[in-house]
Amino acid sequence: MLLSSPLRSSCMLFLTGVLVWFVSCIDVATCFTVLPAQCHHRVSKLLNGNRDGNAAILKNSNPSGMQTLEVVDHKRFLPTGMQVNTPSPQMDRAVPTEDSHVSQGTQSSPTESWTLVPLNFDDDIKKLIDIEKPYYALKNEHSVIDSTGESVGFVCTFRREMPISRENGGISFGEVGRHTAASATVAAALKNPKRGRFHYLASDYTCDVGPLQGVTKGVISKARDGSGDFLTTDLDEDEFIIFCACNELTKRAAHCDIYLETKDTTWHVNIEMSLVSAALFNKKYPTVNTDDENSCRDCNPYASIDGRCLENKKWYPDRAVHDWVTLEASLPSFSAHECIGHFYNGGLRAVPHSVMLFHNGDLIGEAIARLTNRNIPYKKLDHAHGAMFFEHSYREGKVSPKHTKDIVRRTMSFNKSYGIKMRNWECQPQNLNIADSEGLELQVRTYLRDGALGEPGSTYCAECLVKENDSGLVCYKATGTFSLDQVH
């Protein structure tokens, strides 16, 4: 049957519309299919800002309480030339190094000046963050302010407290985690337009260790100190500098880059944190364990931590398929006193992630020792660091000649031993372990990555899992690479 002219026209218009809709769907699907290769830079530009360093972040700026969003500019930067494992593409930023006092690119002009503004923990920081002393141990805190008055970073120092364990170098990666995370918390809190207390909970982070880059001294030399000299010239072997930049901040998340530097090494930590208001956190985790904060005012369990408390160690070699060793151990439940300062007084006490890292590092060292059949001893200090420390103590009259001889004897025995050194680390924290609740189970699976087994300079992969021993609740999963170095 033939259709009338008006009806035929309507049908043609309908079919044309269907065809146009179908083609548009194909285009959209094609765009998402090729997103990683062709569309990612456009989407990234919309979400993260232009590549010149100016990013868009969301800010609640309506004083009447209405949820309106305002786009504001925020400077972000990273040192050039450093290879970093990072999940986002916006890492083409620059930070001044010791030899280059001005950041490169279009982000910072040669005439732009920075200023160091001193901060006081009790007056400026304590009420904004979720941790307190003694877990919080940062000193000499300064906010880095640009010429517009915007905070572009946070710089501070700290003193090493925790043992070196089975590692080489001046500091263990567990302690690096403790202080870099604390600095990220402060940097994000200073950037947060809401002045109330928030929990800044790490959700994902990476750490890369390489030769000294001079980032921290470059920041300090670029900044004009409004309070006198930043205390860098008087630092001893147990003191270190941290610089942290909060590069992205939304209502629910923060992203920070942190640089911790020793005399010959740069630790770069790239961390993503979830922001949770204290009120909301306390609803989810009601306070169930507090001790008398006055009786523990001078306590510091982190300075007396001992990695030799791992229990129920079991190991499983399998050389038929691949040269690898699995080592398991357990930790008893932590008391609220052992978690003091994590979190703030009057709030919930939870086992710090860095404490788990410290014991995890001890287990990694022992697993590599079993795999390689090398002596990797537990120690308070590394060989060179310990020798300098005790020589200084002897000259100051703090130790007797008898004690010095004993130290020299034990130091010389290190010459026949080895230590591990972290090269990179990637971790996904998942759940808190509440104090006075369950103990922890730790598992490390390690195998040779590069080099000859047991030889200096060889590297090893470590796959790690930490979970509660009864519920099986996962606290974190992590993978890392470690080198085996002979103590000289």
Image (cartoon, helix red, strand yellow):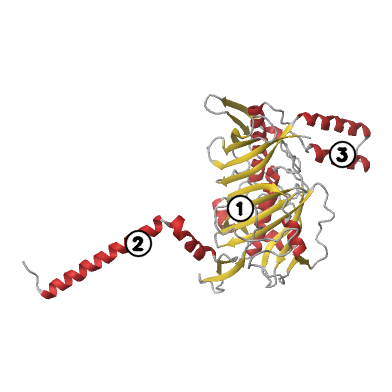
Amino acid at the residue labelled 2: Asp
Amino acid at the residue labelled 3: Phe
Residue of label 1 = 271
Which element type, helix, strand or loop, lies under badge 2?
helix
Above or below, 352 relative to 14 = above
- Residue 104, x across and y down, in percent: 67, 64
- Residue 92, x across and y down, in percent: 60, 59
Residue of label 2 = 27
Q: Which mark is residue 325?
A: none
Which element type, helix, strand or loop, lies under badge 3?
helix
Q: Which mark is residue 390?
A: 3
Q: Pick whichever of labels 1 and 2 is earlier in the sequence.
A: 2
Real-space CA distance between mark 2 and mark 3, rounded to the nearest whole angstrom: 70 Å
Q: Pick whichever of labels 2 and 3 is earlier in the sequence.
A: 2
- Residue 282, x across and y down, in percent: 58, 54
Please state which of the two labelled residues, at mark 1 or mark 2, is closer to the viewer. Answer: 2
Q: Residues within 10 Å of mark 3 (few under 14, many from 20)?
A: some
Amino acid at the residue labelled 1: Ile
Which element type, helix, strand or loop, lies under badge 1?
strand
Residue 344: in sight, yes or no?
no
Q: Residues within 10 Å of mark 1 (few under 14, many from 20)?
A: many
Q: Residues within 10 Å of mark 2 (few under 14, many from 20)?
A: few
At horizontal 61% and vertical 41% (from top left) the residue drawn is 480
At horizontal 9% and vertical 70% (from top left) the residue drawn is 3
Real-space CA distance between mark 1 and mark 2, rounded to the nearest whole angstrom: 36 Å
Q: Is residue 397 left or right of residue 28?
A: right
- On-image quarter of the C terminus: top right
- On-image quarter of the N terminus: bottom left
Q: Nearer the viewer, residue 135 or 399?
A: 399
